[in-house]
Image (cartoon, rainbow, N blue to C red):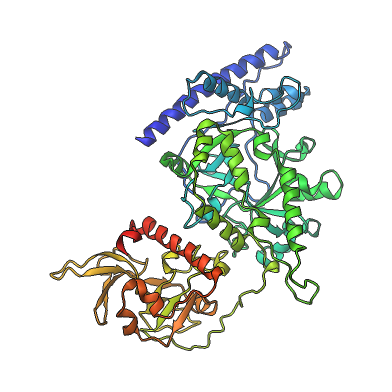
Amino acid sequence: MASRAAAARRQRWRGLEVLIAAAVWLAVSLRAPRQSGVALQVPVLPQRRLAPLAGSSRRLAQAPSRGLWPPQSSVARRAAGKAEAEGEDVGSEAEDLDWRDFRARLVQQEAQKGEGVATAEATAGGGGGGDEDESGGEQSDGWAYATPIIEQGSLLLSAPGDHFAINQQYFHKTVIFIVDHSPNFTKGVILNRPTAFSTGDLRDTLQISAADPLLNSSTDAWNVWCGGDCQGLNSRRSLFDGGVDYCCLHTVERLRPFSNEIIKGAFVIALPEAQRLVEEGEADKDDFLLLVGYCGWGPGQLQRELDRGDSWTLAAADRRQVLGRLREEQASLTQRLEAAIAAPGLDAAAPGAPLARPTAREVGDGIAEWSRLYRALGPRFVEELKNDTETHTDEMLRRWVDACLIPPRYKLSERKQDSDSDFDLLETGTLLRASAKDWVLGKPGYRMRMDTLTADGVPCQYLHKAVLMLAKDYVPRSKDYALVVLLNGPPVGRVEDKDRREVYFGGASSVGGNGNVFEVKGPEPQMLQGMVVVLPRVLEELIDTGALEVVDDVDLQEVLSVPRGERWTAAGGRIETLADAVEARLGDVQKKMWYKRFLGLDLDMVE
């Protein structure tokens, strides 16, 4: 039903675009010089075969290019290029006829009438396309409205809610700028995820060639923004997975000859070109937004997510709404980081001492920028924000920023690359106790920028305050998987036999598979389904960092003899500080959300 309604909305918008094309053609024909031998060029709207899309994925085919991709030019850009080739004045006419501005005027008119396209809500400050107000000055806020059409230049805003609390926290309250769109691939960059990284930090955190422009010493002081989860700051195999992808966005009109236009007044430029312009004094580094990484969608992915209607809002907006505050945001980020680094507390002059560490508060979570744009879409969206009481996922986003967007030079301690575990063998039946503070984001902080922990790839919030038992002997530093089972998981069903014994969750791997139910002997035998399959050499890392701890002073049978909700404490679990209590409370909420999302269980009902 929802998909049919979405298709109907898109059809109405296509009809509106036909009307726009006709109107633009008429405007051009009335204003075009009547000279013999000059063919009238009718602006052609970009073709789009609307296929559903879904969230960003590292497993997609790589984006068509790297660094400066060739985005499709807008109608105005093509018209300007044609006119320039024929020796005409390219000035204002092509820009004035930008069809997106024209469509915004029509959308606002329809919204004011209260009829026509029901889903279109123009921002009140947008005016009729927003070129000038009555006094002749430029309006600062521009225009924005919701739209069902995916196209180059669209904005994708995540919807309020807890959709990204468990994983992909970087998508929570995010603003994504669609810089390229075709039936086969859609590419966007996140605009509101600042980082504490400078380009100089990337030498230590990314495996990229020394000849890469990112490592040019002239850009050591450039701020880096997180553009997405593909080929970006989280990449650990960048030499082998297509390289780090980056771009520079700007709104400087005089740099148009060196740039490609995405929408009217918003440009992308190659990093080496931006570096040259800064070195020659033609531009300032704060003119550019350097984005590392991108968000990618394959055929049909994003449209499917939009059709579900619970995660994303698609919008169109002009340059002032999208990048109008670029310089201010850059300068503000620099000031916040400098203030954080200058904070007293650590002796930065001591040899090898770390710098004072900025937090997500200084780096910024981007929520204010998301709120501004979401509000700009119209009254319905303003009302949604009034009803948005979700603060837990806001905190999860900030935890993710702390773990992933602050470079190692600020950190007080770094995990050793090689495990220093002092055991040669962990035998079957060994008890392990999980931390109450390391599993809030699904894995410990030091691994947030790395691959998954388990073979199933599922985030591991269910390991918060977990009691585990080794189901097979494990030799550290080997190529073997570690097989462990959860001993304090909730009930997930009953055995189909005469006793109808209750079965408990034992781990996310093969949950629900036939024959995957097994028994753990004890005062009362425990029937478990599923297990945790830990990737090779990861178990000892988790033990070394304290995310897991070997329990050698409590007997297995003693733990099994107490109720499941008390087993973590029986295995020696303690919360000793106020800070630990705060983390434990967040972890409790995350664990409940995990069971609800992945198993459909309400822990408040089963505990």
Residue 353 rendering spot, x and y as whole percentages: 75, 74
Which residue is at the front of the view, 152 or 533? 533
- Total number of numbered labels? 0
Which residue is at the front of the view, 57 or 591? 591
Residue farthest along the left direction in this orientation:
498
Up the image or down, 10 lies above or below 58; here it is above
**Residue lying at 31% horizontally and 78% vertically, measured from the top left:** 562
In the picture, residue 486 is in which quadrant?
A: bottom left
Up the image or down, 27 lies above or below 188; here it is above
Residue 210 rendering spot, x and y as whole percentages: 73, 64
From where the camera sits, is residue 90 visible? no
Q: Quarter holding the C terminus?
A: bottom left
**Residue lying at 59% horizontally and 50% vertically, measured from the top left:** 294
Up the image or down, 415 lies above or below 156; here it is below
Left or right, 97 with respect to 388, comes to right
In the picture, residue 326 is in which quadrant?
A: top right
Residue 500 rendering spot, x and y as whole percentages: 17, 68
Q: Quarter holding the N terminus?
A: top left
From where the camera sits, is residue 278 visible? yes
Left or right, 450 with respect to 336, comes to left
In the picture, residue 404 is in which quadrant?
A: bottom right
Residue 113 rendering spot, x and y as whole percentages: 51, 18
Residue farthest along the front direction in this orientation:
578
Up the image or down, 42 lies above or below 192; here it is above
